[in-house]
Amino acid sequence: GTEGGGEVFCDKEIVRMDKAKRKAIIAGNWKMNKTASEAAVLVDELIPAVKDASCEVVICTPFTDLVTAVEKTKGTNIHVGAENVHFEKSGAFTGEISADMLVDLGVEYVIVGHSERRQYFAETDQTVNKRTLAALNAGLKVILCVGEVLSERKDGITSQIVCAQTEIALGGVSADELKNIIIAYEPVWAIGTGETATPEQANEVCAVIRSLIERLYGKDAADAIVVQYGGSMNDKNAAELLAQPDVDGGLIGGASLVAEKFTAIVNAASAK
Ligand code: PGA
């Protein structure tokens, strides 16, 4: 069990709900790429390509592309997300975007706590928590990103780091609100590097996160929560990663900018 030793890796005796009962989510994270005109082209390519997907398809775009993405995807199976959100409702926060502003546009998802925000924009576990609560309050679904850096993995503290990030981010989140949380496990050393976690490494940490959710919210919540893997997932390696029992989808950076590659990943998730 998870109690006692504190060792949650390889908790093989826990019988999990069949992952097929969780709907996989494939989400693109466009990062700071694509002007609105370029976004229009990519969305036009994606709409027919992913229309028969049995997984949930999300594209998270720069703020300036959101209107285009929302307008173009109306009546399709593509859902639109932002890449960040501010935690205050409104006010003197020059350059920031509130959750209400996103909801009013028709945006459904938002990425919170991406490692690039943590690394380059002073995001902390505390601000990740504040953004998560603000987004949930406004009715957004949150793709909450967690993950260790290479030195933490080498030091053998991956599960502690990822669990601490997750638990702090979820502070004050109710069991009901948890239904609007997707957790993306993204080892920082695998993001944009071409170095993917092995399927076993990805699954191991996704399972650790699920065990933490069980400890915090109970078994039903743990069985239901979608845990994605992210970090150099592409059209070649997606099937193997998505076949893992605790990997319920992917957060895709580079490969989400190319319609054929993103579609191949959506197809790999749909085949599960
Ligand atoms: P990548 O990015 O697929 O380009 O590694 C993933 C992410 O940062 O979400």
Image (cartoon, grey):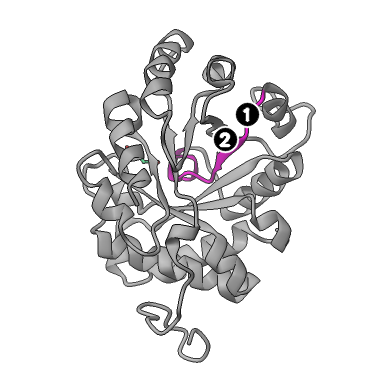
Q: What residue type is disc 2 on?
A: Asn
Q: Quadrant of residue 29?
A: top left
Q: CA distance from mark 1 to mark 2?
A: 12 Å
21 or 158, nearer to the observer: 21
- Indicate which disc residue 84 carries: 2
The region drawn magenta spans: 106-120
Mark with earlier residue (1, 2): 2
Residue 172 visible somewhere in the drawing: no
Local secondary structure at mark 2: loop
Marking on residue 107: 1
User: Image height check: is 222 above or below 169?
Assistant: below
Residue at x-position 54% and y-position 51%: 182
Q: Is residue 111 magenta?
A: yes
Question: Please, is residue 56 above or below residue 257 in the view?
Answer: below
Q: Position of residue 181 (x, y in %)?
A: 60, 52
Q: Is residue 216 above or below residue 201?
A: below
Which one is in front, 48 or 73?
48
The quadrant in which residue 156 appears is bottom left
Residue reaching furthest bottom? Answer: 4
Mark 2 CB lies closer than 8 A to ligand 1:
no
Viewer-proximal residue among 227 and 130: 227
Q: Amino acid at mark 1?
A: Val
Mark 1: which secondary structure? loop
Taking the magenta stretch, the answer to whether it contains residue 143 is no
125 to the left or right of 175:
left
x and y percent of residue 129 in the render?
64, 52
**Residue 196 locus on image (x, y percent):** 24, 50
Q: Is residue 177 visible?
A: yes
Measuring 38% from the left and 71% from the top, which residue is drawn there? 157
Name the quadrant where ligand 1 sits: top left
Q: Position of residue 13 (x, y in %)?
A: 41, 85
Residue at 36 percent across and 64 percent down: it is 245
